[in-house]
Amino acid sequence: MVAHTTSTEPINVTLRVWRQAGPKSAGKFVEYKANNCNPNMSFLEMLDVVNEELTLKGEEPIAFAHDCREGICGTCSLMIDGKPHGPQKGVATCQTYMRSFQNGAVITVEPFRAAPFPVIKDLVTDRSAFDQIQQAGGFISVRTGAAPDANATPVPKEDADLAMDAASCIGCGACVAACKNASAMLFVSAKVSQFSLLPQGQPERDQRVLAMVAKMDELGFGNCTNQYECSAACPKLISHEFIARMNKDYLAASFRAAFKPKSNATAGGA
């Protein structure tokens, strides 16, 4: 059950924030008071106020990642009270508001914990591993050009809807942070499925899933636990059923690759 206040009165909270000067430095929790918080301010706005007070006192502000603050970019990745993005289901940290917490609450704020996401400073982690997986095959090479007429490339509505659901992944890494194995399978399955469900994604379907799964394994992400914490923590509510879809694609692609005839060009010759 999510604790929250419906009062419009300012609230006071105590923050236990993970402070770490650099990737190789030892980290520790440091307490800060955030007083007179407007219940309707976002969690990031509250951190802005705390940082302004720290700056005025000549102290180092808390480093945290943020960009759009509209739940789209996925950079505001914080572990709040042990949950990726905090207590609210289906929202990112930037759309978590202080009314989600009770007056007097003690709130623990940490970076995402996963070996492929090393801490850069304080609450900022390096999540470029996701970029590497995407670069391994999460694209199509066909020229898309201008937007075609809606009926030029027929796509069943169910497939179009599923592809849109998969494409809503913002790559924040909450799925990795929520999984005890630090598995990235929800992220990878979403990026694989958004193309494999559409006609434009068919020419490289096998190559894509094989390359992206191989890169995921190479970067040290763990295997799926089948507990679906990833889906529960996802701010875009992406279904774990995409993982089953990716596994099916991967198995079929592996089978076809094993029996694929070798071309004369790759075999060499005089």
Image: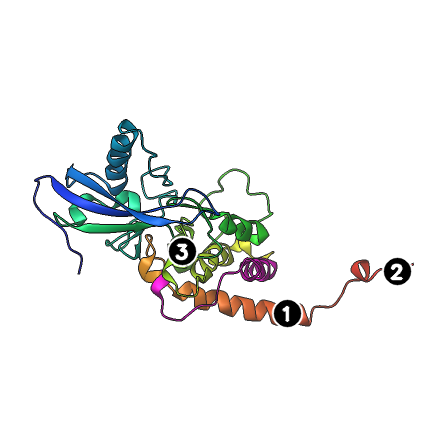
Residue range of the region highlighted in magenta in the rendering: 205-230
**On-image quarter of the N terminus:** bottom left
- 3D distance between C-alphas at marks 1 and 3: 37 Å
Q: Which residue is mark 1?
A: 256
Q: How many marks?
A: 3
Q: Earlier in the sequence, mark 1 or mark 3?
A: 3
Q: Earlier in the sequence, mark 2 or mark 3?
A: 3
Q: Main secondary structure of the magenta part?
A: helix
Queried whether the magenta region covers residue 226, the answer comes back as yes
- 3D distance between C-alphas at marks 2 and 1: 25 Å
Residue type at tag 2: Gly
Q: Residue furthest right?
A: 270
Report the front residue among 159 and 128: 128
Q: Which residue is mark 3?
A: 113
* Residue located at (36% from left, 41% from top): 64
Residue type at tag 1: Arg
Q: Which residue is mark 2?
A: 269
> Element under label 3?
loop
> Element under label 1?
helix
- Above or below for 214 versus 60: below
Near mark 2 (Cα within 10 A), the count class, few <14, some 14-19 or many ≥20, is few
Q: Earlier in the sequence, mark 2 or mark 1?
A: 1
> Element under label 2?
loop
- Above or below for 226 versus 103: below
